[in-house]
Image: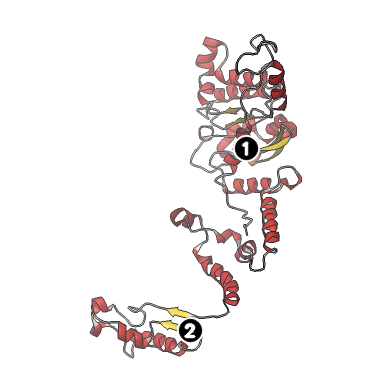
């Protein structure tokens, strides 16, 4: 069964939330019938009639989610270059265009993905950015925004309020809640990370905006936001996994020889925080930390032993430096240690324990007699 993991999946949270809206973005909406559309009594080859186009537009379901990326140079050169030459800047032109076309394109929400300014210590850049984003608020378009690496004092530091002072003067939690209105769900670190739910085409969509170099507690907050959505159309991640598991359990009951291993229960017994080792996963793709492999094996054996009907135990051990001291291939037969004193005495004791177990509840692979017979100089 699928485990409900409270700490995994942090690498995909932001991309999944954003992709949900991006995938829903469709082609440009239909235009009204015009003189270019042939009249019903004189249809052009391969063209739809005006009524057919109107019907298609009526049935089509689409919305547009504008994504505003990397506005740092618009903010940086707003006062020195753009305004003196054009009387505006590209940042404001973009947000003004979104407001102007929000009804035509069915725009429910906008997303700024960070790098709002180029030099976070320059107040004028922040003023220019805030002015551009205010156009969205005044035009009734709620949005999410996050600090990028250009927007913080130290890009190598994990997200914190102290590292994002300038950003929070314009986009703190109170301002984000005010502009988000009914779409606002929650915020963390005074607005560095925020969550929103907006409606489009009869469905609810979430924008989960996580700050640059998000701290570990930011990811924990984000997981909590996802898991708390059980009361909405956006069923929480944990509840969704539980529902899948219930379905699997129900299907398994229909078959006599199908057995379920309660993996979430196993993880819970030994601790979910230590069950997964990110380092092991990245280096060897081992999904379970080395310290819990024994627990996983024992859980499988609880099923395998009674189903197999026979239990056979085998003790497999090395020869060199295990059944005797030294390495035969390097030290020769006369150089190994197997006398009555240390370290030979320890190896003798191990051999005696193996010999006692042989023939009772364990079959030894490599005992005293076999070791002496098979171990020889090359």
The answer to which image quadrant residue 145 occupies is top right
Residue 89: x and y in percent read 56, 17
How is colour applied across the structure in the image? secondary structure
Give whichever of 251, 237 is nearer the camera. Answer: 251
Residue 324: x and y in percent read 33, 83
Mark 1 touches mark 2? (CB < 8 Å): no
Residue 207's mark? none
Query: Which quadrant is home to the C terminus?
Result: bottom left
Instruction: From the image, tell me which residue sits under label 1.
Output: 20
Give whichever of 130, 315 is nearer the camera. Answer: 315
Q: Is residue 339 above or below residue 120?
A: below
Query: Which quadrant is home to the N terminus?
Result: bottom right
Q: Is residue 283 above or below residue 108?
A: below
**Residue drawn at (70%, 11%) of the image:** 41
**Residue drawn at (73%, 24%) of the image:** 58
Q: Is residue 182 above or below residue 310?
A: above
Q: Is residue 270 above or below residue 157?
A: below
Instruction: From the image, tell me which residue sits under label 2.
Output: 362
Residue 56: x and y in percent read 69, 24
**Residue drawn at (59%, 17%) of the image:** 93
First in sequence: mark 1 vs mark 2 = 1
Of helix, strand and loop, which one carries label 2?
Answer: loop
Residue 345: x and y in percent read 36, 87
- CA gap between label 1 and label 2 equals 56 Å
Of helix, strand and loop, which one carries label 1?
Answer: helix
Q: Is residue 343 left or right of residue 100?
A: left
Q: Is residue 146 left or right of residue 157?
A: right
**Residue drawn at (67%, 68%) of the image:** 256
Check disc 1: other Cα within 10 Å, few if <14, some if 14-19, many if 20+.
few
Residue 192 visible in image: no
């Amino acid at each position: 069964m699928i485990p409900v993991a409270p700490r995994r999946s942090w690498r995909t949270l932001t991309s999944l939330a954003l992709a949900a809206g991006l995938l829903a973005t469709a082609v440009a909406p239909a235009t009204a019938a015009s003189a270019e559309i042939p009249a019903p009594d004189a249809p052009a080859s391969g063209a739809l009639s005006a009524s057919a186009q109107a019907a298609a537009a009526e049935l089509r379901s689409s919305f547009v989610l504008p994504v505003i990326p990397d506005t740092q140079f618009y903010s940086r050169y707003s006062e020195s270059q753009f305004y003196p030459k054009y009387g505006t800047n590209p940042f404001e032109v973009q947000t003004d265009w979104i407001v102007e076309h929000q009804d035509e394109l069915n725009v429910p929400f906008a997303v700024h993905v960070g790098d709002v300014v180029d030099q976070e210590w320059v107040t004028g850049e922040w003023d220019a950015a805030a002015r551009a984003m205010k156009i969205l608020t005044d035009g009734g378009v709620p949005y999410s925004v996050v600090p990028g690496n250009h927007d913080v004092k130290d890009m190598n530091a994990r997200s914190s309020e102290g590292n994002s002072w300038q950003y929070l003067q314009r986009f703190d939690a109170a301002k984000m809640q005010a502009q988000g209105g009914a779409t606002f769900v929650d915020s963390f670190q005074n607005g560095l990370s925020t969550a929103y739910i907006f409606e489009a085409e009869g469905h609810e969509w979430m924008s989960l905006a996580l700050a640059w170099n998000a701290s570990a507690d930011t990811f924990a907050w984000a997981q909590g936001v996802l898991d708390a959505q059980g009361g909405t159309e956006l069923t929480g991640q944990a509840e969704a996994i539980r529902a899948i598991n219930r379905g699997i359990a129900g299907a398994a009951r229909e078959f006599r020889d199908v057995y379920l291993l309660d993996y979430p229960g196993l993880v819970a017994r030994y601790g979910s925080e230590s069950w997964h080792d990110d380092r092991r996963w990245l280096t060897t793709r081992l999904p379970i930390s080395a310290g819990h492999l024994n627990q996983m094996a024992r859980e499988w054996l609880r099923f395998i032993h009674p189903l197999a009907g026979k239990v056979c135990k085998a003790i497999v051990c090395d020869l060199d430096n295990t059944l005797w001291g030294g390495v035969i291939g390097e030290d020769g037969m006369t150089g190994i240690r197997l006398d009555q004193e240390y370290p030979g005495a320890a190896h003798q004791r191990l051999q005696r324990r193996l010999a006692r177990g042989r023939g009772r509840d364990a079959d030894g692979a490599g005992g005293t007699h076999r070791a002496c017979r098979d171990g020889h100089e090359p």
